[in-house]
Amino acid sequence: MRLETIAVADLARPSGTRSPVGLLAASGPALVRVPGPMTHRHPERLGSERKLRNSREFVAVQTGGTLFRGRCMLLLVLPRPGELTRVGFIASKRGVGGAVQRNRARRRLREIVRRRWARVADQGYWMVFIASRAALDASHERLAAEVESLLASAGILAAAGAEH
């Protein structure tokens, strides 16, 4: 993120209006650093073009995909030569629990996959992670190791030092 330096005197506002940087301490420094405008998207972000979006896509992976089983999740992989690799996440009410638990399980898996996305094959696969109840209680390290193991056994993940 780009930071801009501006003088505190430039932040003076008429009484009754709010400063865009919040409250400033009277004994604070003469210069304040405020974030500038956002110039680019986060490089590790999973854009919408990388996500499975509708039920037809999920059903296609579930009916034609290969299953890889772990202790905390399942991974379904459908080869799609020539297409961008895309991913989806499922946490069912029966398999995981209520809405809070389902959202937490999906969020945890999505973050782990997002962090490893640079090592995932750029093209040729649709994949769906299906969380189980064990994904709620497992440590982050265990979930990350399982995601890597499942992706590696599916042949989708590059080695840790290798970037493509």
Image (cartoon, rainbow, N blue to C red):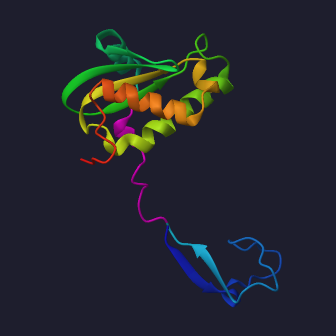
Residue 132, how many percent across, how many down? 55, 17
Q: From what the image shows, is residue 93 above or below residue 13?
A: above
Using residue 80 as the reference point, say whether residue 68 is left or right of it: right
- Image point 51% across, 18% down: which residue? 71
- Image point 31% across, 35% down: which residue? 157
Looking at the picture, tell me which residue is in the foreground, 28 or 47: 28
Which residue ends up furthest to the left in the rendered image?
82
Q: From what the image shows, is residue 18 above or below residue 140?
A: below
Q: From what the image shows, is residue 145 above or below residue 73?
A: below
Magenta region: 38-52
Residue 3 in magenta? no
Residue 64, how many percent across, how many down? 28, 11
**Main SS of the magenta segment?**
loop
Residue 75, how many percent across, how many down? 40, 20
Question: Would you identify the image quadrant in which residue 67 lies?
Answer: top left
Residue 43 in magenta? yes
Using residue 161 as the reference point, say whether residue 113 is left or right of it: right
- Is residue 52 something that shows in the picture? no
Q: How many numbered marks, from 0 up? A: 0
